[in-house]
């Protein structure tokens, strides 16, 4: 991406940079398409132009005094243009099949596109191939994506005449919030859907289909050859369950058929690993309408996995100088007024409860309770740093349309900690938190991660000097851990900068887990202090820290990372004993008990089924060790061992089997430099 350079601010006309850095003057305030065609640039090499951080398609008038560069078709920006155009092509195909269709929004997304629409009937998967056929017929016509500018009133008249109520609502919202570019950015449902000028909005036409849109788009449809519609889902308009339920068609598009096929193979593998399906098949968790959406019921096997993670979490926190605390599930309204949650976060909180003249709210966060523990007595600089850690369950009202298995829920247990330290201790504590996070992620099998340092936004609390010091401390913490990092400019919360760590799973998909967040706001609101060496009160630095994010979300990520085949130390059932016949059941029970006596998790499949069926069932359940016992094994006090994945380990004495499984029953050894700071809790 080429940024605007003041060196060219006095150019008489814009310039286009082509291969080799050659600069070619192009007409100002005219679409770039004719210039690109005259230059003979191959279609596969460029689909748009970049200027001043923006991507402009070849139909957009070129800004005066601009320096532009070409956007290649296979670049991330180029793929976004390709996919946005595919969304319009899909909508044009749907309009062919359903002329009465009403269209909402249709953006490009991370790995594809979607379009929300209201149709006269519900779509079924069998409809998608027919829509694809229509898309291919339209694409073969080399239809141009024609950009049009229209006044707000004319655009509203067009939308009303064509009975496009959702476009009417978008336009009226734009009109009511102002016509400056960026007026839509406060509404995520509208952002990016339309370009707003002083008096005009933009539309794009593809064949008979016209859409309110800001672009950018391909010059024409001939490059749309490698696409696939993947599935249909429901989506509330504007994400509000009180609004109409629309049908959302998802798809993806690539530059080549080979890239598309590779992506579809990854999607198929992702479906195979979907934690919602595996959660049901492996009997880990469920959600019941009678309980409520986003409220997880942990089944015995899921409960075991969660317990193993929580036990490891608590043990390691104690080993690394944290104090474990517990807090209630609700607190008085005054607490949430002081913290600012009722002022800034109330829409995410459940309604108040009133008893005996007092108002209470269930907690959306744990931090105010930890502050109360801090304030329970006078603190000295000799007490700091204090590290309060809690697996605290919180409740946040997420709209029904965004709930997603374990990954987006309404009640979840956050692996929370709050660190209170002096300014001099701050950098060391941040470094410890980052190193501790990486230790946890590596232990659970994640090896690829990206760190993001989110800096000061336009609106913030605290002073600039503290922000700068904290931001530099975050950068040094990443460097100290030997990790490269990216800057997320202005991405910090209003109350402090932060480090986010995204891990990549076995399919290379990024997941947000760790956050280490400064807070210059809460300590001021609650007026917390410590007594310094000068015997005067001082304000401590406060750091929010979550390593895994939440137990629910982390379990969802972990299930998909391993495809449900947990390593032995995390497997809910480590060994299943399969008696060949009923007469072998007492011996199977004895083998199972020997495993349990060694603190291993074992069970017996005593059903009256054929042994082949039992083996297949155990394989479907992804059990690490399948132990078959019959006449020979019973006589010799052995077991016939099959390891997960179909590996036949042969016959093994029971004592050897116990030692084999026990050797895998501990977390992997992961080295982490542990820095001991002066002072702090008695656990150090």
Image (cartoon, rainbow, N blue to C red):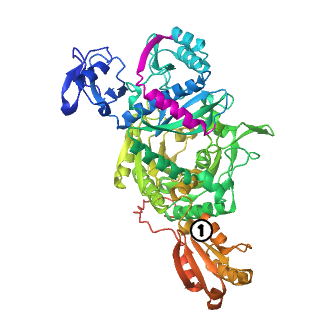
Q: Nearer the viewer, residue 649 or 401?
A: 649
Q: Nearer the viewer, residue 168 or 394?
A: 168
* Left or right, 77 with reference to 563: left
SS at mark 1 in the image: loop
* Left or right, 325 with reference to 442: right
Q: Is residue 422 above or below residue 126?
A: below
Q: Quadrant of residue 15?
A: top left
Q: Which residue in the rendered view is the most extreme toward the bottom?
A: 635
* Left or right, 480 with reference to 204: left
Q: Residue at x 62, y 53 (%)?
A: 277
Q: Is residue 132 visible?
A: yes
For label 1, the residue is 623
Q: Is residue 454 above or below residue 683?
A: above
Label 1: few (<14), some (14–19) or many (≥20) C-alpha neighbours in 10 Å = many
Image quadrant holding the N terminus, namely: top left
Residue 123 position, x and y percent, is 63, 34
Q: Residue at x 59, y 68 (%)?
A: 623
Q: Magenta segment: does it hold 602? A: no
Residues drawn in magenta = 124-152
Residue 73 position, x and y percent, is 34, 34
């Amino acid at each position: 991406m080429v940024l605007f350079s003041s060196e060219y601010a006095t150019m008489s006309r814009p310039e286009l940079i082509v291969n080799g850095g050659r600069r070619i003057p192009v007409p100002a305030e005219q679409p770039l398409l004719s210039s690109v065609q005259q230059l003979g640039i191959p279609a596969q090499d460029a689909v748009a132009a970049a200027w001043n951080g923006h991507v402009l398609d070849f139909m957009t008038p070129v800004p005066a005094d601009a320096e532009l560069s070409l956007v290649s078709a296979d670049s991330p920006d180029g793929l976004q243009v390709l996919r946005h155009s595919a969304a319009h092509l899909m909508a044009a195909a749907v309009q062919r099949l359903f002329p009465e269709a009403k269209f909402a929004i249709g953006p490009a997304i991370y790995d594809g596109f979607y379009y929300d629409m209201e149709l006269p009937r519900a779509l079924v998967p069998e409809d998608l191939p027919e829509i694809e056929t229509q898309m291919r017929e339209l694409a073969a016509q080399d239809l141009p994506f024609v950009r049009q500018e229209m006044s707000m009133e004319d655009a509203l008249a067009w939308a009303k005449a064509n009975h496009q109520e959702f476009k009417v609502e978008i336009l009226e919202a734009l009109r009511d919030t102002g016509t400056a570019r960026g007026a839509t950015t406060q509404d995520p449902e509208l952002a990016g859907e339309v370009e707003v000028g002083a008096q005009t909005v933009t539309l794009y036409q593809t064949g008979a289909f016209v859409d309110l849109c800001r672009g950018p788009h391909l010059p024409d449809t001939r490059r749309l050859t490698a696409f696939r519609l993947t599935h249909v889902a429901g989506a509330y308009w504007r994400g509000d369950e009180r609004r109409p339920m629309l049908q959302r068609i998802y798809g993806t598009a690539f530059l080549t058929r080979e890239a598309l096929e590779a992506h579809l193979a990854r999607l198929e593998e992702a479906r195979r690993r979907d934690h919602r399906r595996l959660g049901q098949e492996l009997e880990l968790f469920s959600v019941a309408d009678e309980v409520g959406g986003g409220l997880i019921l942990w089944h015995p096997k899921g409960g075991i996995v969660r317990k193993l993670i929580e036990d490891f979490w608590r043990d390691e926190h104690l080993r690394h100088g944290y104090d474990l605390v517990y807090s209630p599930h609700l607190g008085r309204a005054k607490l949430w007024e002081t913290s600012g949650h009722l002022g800034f976060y109330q829409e995410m909180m459940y309604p108040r409860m009133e008893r005996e003249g007092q108002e209470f709210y269930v907690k959306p966060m744990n931090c105010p309770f930890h502050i109360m523990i801090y304030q329970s007595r006078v603190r000295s600089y000799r007490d700091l740093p204090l590290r309060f850690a809690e697996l605290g369950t919180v409740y946040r009202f997420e709209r029904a349309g965004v709930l997603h298995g374990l990954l987006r829920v309404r009640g979840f247990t956050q692996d929370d900690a709050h660190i209170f330290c002096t300014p001099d201790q701050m950098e060391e504590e941040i470094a410890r938190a980052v190193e501790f996070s990486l230790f946890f992620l590596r232990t659970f099998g994640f090896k690829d991660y990206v760190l993001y340092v989110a800096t000061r936004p336009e609106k913030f609390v605290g002073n600039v000097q503290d922000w700068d010091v904290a931001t530099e401390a975050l950068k040094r913490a990443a460097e100290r851990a030997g990790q490269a990092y990216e800057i997320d400019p202005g991405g910090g919360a209003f109350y402090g900068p932060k480090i986010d760590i995204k891990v990549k799973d076995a399919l290379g998909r990024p997941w947000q887990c760790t956050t280490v967040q400064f807070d210059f706001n809460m300590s001021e609101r609650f007026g917390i202090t410590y007594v310094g060496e000068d015997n005067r009160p001082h304000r401590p630095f406060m750091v929010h820290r979550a390593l895994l994010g939440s137990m629910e979300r982390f379990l969802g990520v972990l299930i998909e990372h391993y495809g449900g085949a947990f390593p032995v130390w995390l497997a809910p059932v480590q060994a299943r004993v399969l008696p060949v016949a009923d007469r072998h059941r007492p011996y199977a029970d004895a083998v199972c008990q020997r495993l349990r006596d060694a603190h291993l998790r074992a069970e017996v499949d005593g059903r009256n089924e054929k042994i082949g069926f039992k083996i297949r069932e155990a394989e479907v359940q992804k059990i690490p060790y399948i132990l078959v016992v019959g006449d020979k094994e019973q006589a010799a006090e052995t077991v016939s061992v099959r390891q997960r994945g179909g590996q036949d380990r042969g016959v093994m004495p029971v004592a050897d089997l116990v030692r084999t499984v026990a050797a895998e029953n501990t977390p992997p050894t992961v080295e982490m430099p542990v820095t001991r700071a002066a002072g702090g809790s008695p656990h150090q």
